Image (cartoon, rainbow, N blue to C red):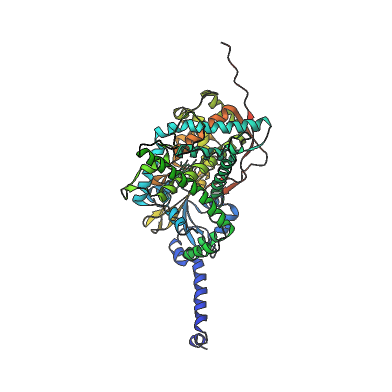
Amino acid sequence: MGATDVLSGISSWQILLIVFVSSIILYGFRPFYRWPLRHIPGRTPKWFWGNLMELRAGGPVQTHAKWAQEYGPVYTSFGGTRPFVFTDQPDLVRQVLLQHSSRPMFPTIWQGKEREFDKASILAVRGDKHKSVRSAWQPMFFTGSLESYSALMNEATDVLLLKLAAAAKKNRVVDLYKLIGCMTLQVVGTTAFGVEFNAQELDSADNKLGKEEQQAAQRLRDAVAYIFTVSVFAFSAYSPFIFLFPFMAPLLRVVAGVFPDRGLLKMKRSREIVIDEVAALIRKRRLALNEEADGGKQDGGEGLREDTLQVRTGVAPGSFLDLLMSAKDRTTGRAFTDLELANQAFIMMLAGYETTAAALSFTLYLLAANPDKQQLLVEDVDGFGRDRVPGLEDLERLPFLDACLKEGLRLYPPAPTHIREAARDTEIGGYRVRKGQWLGCAVYSMHRNPKYWKDPERFLPERFIEGAEEHEEGVYKKWLPFGDGVRACIGARFALMEAKVTLVRLYQRFTFELEAGQVPLKIRNNITISPEHGVLVRAIPRPPTLQREP
Ligand code: HEM
């Protein structure tokens, strides 16, 4: 029997089925994606899943650290059928970040307005639009602005200190990650918007919030925490499918819109809570501006005041949102739309809260786990003074504090991987890659690779002190927790300042003892990393300073 006889015995729908099944099988291997990368070493991808199962089992950042040592500085790995070319070699990481400025966006489940909302983000926009949006963000991080925030950061730390003192009195264990998360949310509220989110008041036994305020604060805090802690690839049953079958995204979005599962509804609700909050802030500020223009009294917005911890109700003049509202979009010559404004405020709230909370918690964990280093930091802080409130300039004169934070960011970079899309056909470490290829910078792996660091697993802040061998060899060439190039973290100075203010104030009053069973620390891998079960410590009050005889 010949091939024609076999084919003539098959009906057309059977042929269609065969074509469909073969396409799916073929799609699972993506030969056209894999072929151009065949010369680069790397993991053999499994059908459809690529290397996702291995990443899931071993933890993404730890697995990449293993692969980088196994395959060398440039290697491939597959997120589903999508190939990535990864590098953890410092020069190559810099080359990628400096030469390729677009961050590819993963397909998402959101549709309609929600999708438009995400597309307006500083993280997503490209080219001139990105330059325009970024320059509107910039004034928040000028030295003058930062100076005015230090008082607000100190106020937020006051509340944290009170909570720790209460816990210490009862010898109670506290979760520093949770407490600090509330504090950084308060800092974002007061510095970026001039608004009190009341996040810290919630856990205080003597909080003065009314029932409604309490519920609103709780809702906001839970929503922000949820958005960050739940994996973007797994919060809904639809999420992995949309990642594995990006070509089916339009269909999956429609199906998910009609039959949303619980995870999707919870994420949608959490996003709505945060978006509604920022939309209300924008409305309030507009109202105040209109009244001002009419010569009426200004509503809310008391300005970035330095001396109070009162509940603020409106967006402060001079705050991030206020500056953003008066900025011009250089690409259109007009003001930013409400959707664009709301998205920047949304990103500000999320970026400003979680990454800094993680950086601080990891550093405090490392210090508690290394009491000898903690003691050196205490001495550095005592040299500054136990009763002084640090301002921006003071923070530059605390070298060991600076070194501890940098070493914390080395061992636990809160944003552990940076992804770029190749802007043109190019070469990475001698391997050719095509335009459009997704490139991964494995920063966590780079920060722990023994090829680049001495004793990489140890907490050795001294490497960041001027004069130390590693410092003199060029420690900053291989340390990139804030990225590089035009997409580098815009909030880096703000984050470092907030973290330093907090550390100084904490160590003026306390040292910390780590609860047993937390070494090594379990980390949660999402877009960012954070301590999976928090950082559990006992705060030990430091004895008061002895007064010297006159
Ligand atoms: C320790 C804390 C922080 C760390 C480790 C961190 C890390 C990073 C990194 C690595 C990037 C670049 C990612 C890439 O290359 O794709 C980034 C971007 C960004 N960060 Fe941060 N960040 C921190 C705090 C903050 C804060 C406090 C803010 C806001 C107040 C902020 C706002 C942003 C924004 C808006 C971008 C996007 C910039 C752009 O695309 O032009 N970050 N951050």
Against 425, residue 206 (above or below) is above
Residue at 54% in and 65% down? 47
Rendered position, 413 above or below 385: below
Work out which residue is located at the far left of the displayed protein and give it.
333
Camera-side residue of 317 and 451: 317
484 relative to 155 in the view: left or right: left
Which residue is depicted at the point 57% across and 33% down? Answer: 160
In the image, residue 18 sits, relative to residue 164, either above or below, namely below
Q: Position of residue 516 (x, y in %)?
A: 68, 39
Determine the image quadrant of residue 293.
top left
Quarter of the figure with the C terminus: top right
Q: How many marks?
A: 0
- Say whether residue 53 is visible: yes
Image coordinates for residue 114, horizontal then vertical, percent: 46, 55
Residue visible at 56% across and 44% down in the picture: 216
In depth, the one of 464 and 421 nearer the eye is 421
Considering depth in this image, is 278 or 175 the residue closer to the camera? 278
User: Is residue 474 visible to us here?
Assistant: no
- 525 with respect to 104 (left or right): right
Residue 179 in percent (x, y) is at: 59, 38
- The picture places residue 223, in percent across and down from the top left corner, at 55, 48
Q: Nearer the viewer, residue 410 or 116?
A: 116
